[in-house]
Every structure is written in C-alpha cells, then in structure tokens.
Amino acid sequence: MNIVSKIKNQISTNPIIIYMKGSPDFPSCGFSARAIKILLSLKVRFAYIDILQHSDIRSELPKFSNWPTFPQLWVSGKLIGGSDIMLEMFNNGELKKIIIKALKSNKK
C-alpha cells in the first residue's frame, strides 16, 4: 500500500483522527498540545497518528491535504484544520456540533 492510500484509509476508517507531533499523553509541540486539550475537553474518542514516528506520513500528508502544518484534525473524512482553527471552532461551538454529527453518522 502506498503512503497516500494508507493516509486515505486512516482518514476513512476513523471518524475523528488527528495527525500530531507526539501523542495525546505526551504532545511534542504547543500546537499539538492545544489541539489535544480541545479534543479531550469534548470527551470524545479519536484516533491519532504521531507524525514524528511516521516520516512518510509527515512528508506526504501536507501534499495530500494541501495544508502545510501539523496538527491536522480530520472529521468524517474532511480536513478541519490545525489548532488555531480548532480553537476558534471550539469557542463558537461549531467543533462540538461537527464531532457529534460525525459520531452519530458513524454508528449507523
């Protein structure tokens, strides 16, 4: 499986997935830490990929997503964005709505 196929598979099989530096328990940058704090505050299950452990994903995902930085949050197969966008959407309530909708449609 080539790396783009692997990325597409990860995104399609996980309703909520974040590509980040480090892990939820040990984020390796401030932006990833902020993104994880937001997701944890929503009390939802999510998958994560530590891009520091996967150099192939780290190099190919920005080309695939047309988004140059990490973290990258994907919900229902769509790129939401990085920590700044997540924070803005969290503060206005939009992120919670998108995530709840994703989780409900995944159960069907």
Image (spheres, rainbow, N blue to C red):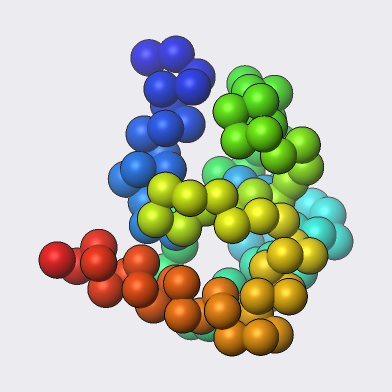
Which quadrant does the C terminus fall into?
bottom left
Q: Image quarter for residue 55?
A: top right
Residue 60, percent from left and from top: 63, 23
Residue placed farthest to the right in the image?
A: 30
How many badges with numbers are in the image? Answer: 0
Q: Is residue 64 above or below residue 80?
A: above
> Is residue 22 at least partly visible in the picture?
no
The residue lying at 64 percent from left, 50 percent from top is: 72
The residue lying at 44 percent from left, 72 percent from top is: 99
> Is residue 106 at least partly visible in the picture?
yes
The residue lying at 41 percent from left, 22 percent from top is: 5
102 or 51, which lies in front? 102
51 or 79, which lies in front? 79
Which quadrant does the N terminus fall into?
top left
Residue 41, percent from left and from top: 59, 83
Residue placed farthest to the top in the image?
A: 2
91 or 9, which lies in front? 91
Q: Image quarter for residue 40?
A: bottom right
Q: Is residue 91 above or below residue 61?
A: below
Report whether 22 appears left or right of 106. right
Report whether 69 appears left or right of 60. right
The residue lying at 35 percent from left, 73 percent from top is: 101
Report whether 32 appears left or right of 100. right
Q: Is residue 6 above or below residue 29?
A: above
Residue 54, percent from left and from top: 62, 29
Residue 32, percent from left and from top: 74, 58
